[in-house]
Amino acid sequence: MERPYDGHTNCLFCRWIRAGKAVETLDTVAAFDDGFPVTAGHLLIVPLRHTADWLFMTRREISDSETLIRALVEKIRLRDPSVTGFNIGTNIGASAGQTVFHAHIHLIPRRDGDTASPEGGVRGVVDGKRGYHPS
């Protein structure tokens, strides 16, 4: 099956798609090793079609992403029993930290002790906001 691609030559992820760098694919999406991994095994799930961010992904691309993420989680857990959790997320817009303007979802394996205080998880994207004390 020929993969959809619309010729965005300056897009890093479009170049990765053209170069066949995917570690796994599923219909409309592919997974790639993150170029600057937060933890070992950090992956990016990227639609094969160039689109700016998650909000512009089609329902099919979102569904394929979810299916691929679930399959990758199982593979990671089987391959690396030290993985005890995951962060899954996307950045939409420069103010949210997006630096490659081709939609992508981060799948970040987490291990006990990989940070001193993981409480608050993704709240840590804003300095000083990770730690909180839920009642």
Image (spheres, rainbow, N blue to C red):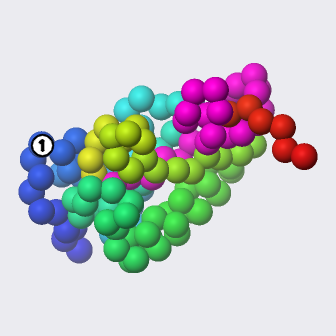
Q: Is residue 75 above or below residue 15?
A: below
Residue drawn where x is 55% and y is 33% of the image: 126
Whether residue 83 sits left or right of residue 44 in the image: it is right
Q: Where is residue 21 in the image (x, y as percent from the top left)?
A: 30, 46
Is residue 71 inside the magenta stretch? no
Residue drawn where x is 31% and y is 66% of the image: 56
Residue extending farthest to the right is 135
In the picture, the quarter occupied by the N terminus is bottom left
- Disc 1 on helix, strand or loop? loop
| Residue 9 in sight in this render | yes
Q: Where is residue 129 in the image (x, y as percent from the top left)?
A: 65, 33
- Which residue, given by chain and number where applicable, does mark 1 sit on? 10
Whether residue 106 sits left or right of residue 6 in the image: it is right
Q: Where is residue 82 in the image (x, y as percent from the top left)?
A: 74, 36
Whether residue 96 sits left or right of residue 102 in the image: it is right
Q: In this view, does 31 lie above or below 62?
A: above
Q: How many labels does the image show?
A: 1
Considering depth in this image, is 56 or 76 the residue closer to the camera?
56
Q: Give the range drawn in magenta.
A: 103-129
The quadrant holding residue 81 is: top right
Considering depth in this image, is 52 or 68 the residue closer to the camera?
52
Residue drawn where x is 33% and y is 40% of the image: 94
The amino acid sitting under disc 1 is Asn
Considering depth in this image, is 50 or 34 the residue closer to the camera?
50
**Label 1 Cα neighbours within 10 Å, binned few <14 / some 14-19 / many ≥20:** few
Residue extending farthest to the top is 116
Is residue 119 inside the magenta stretch? yes
Residue drawn where x is 18% and y is 45% of the image: 11
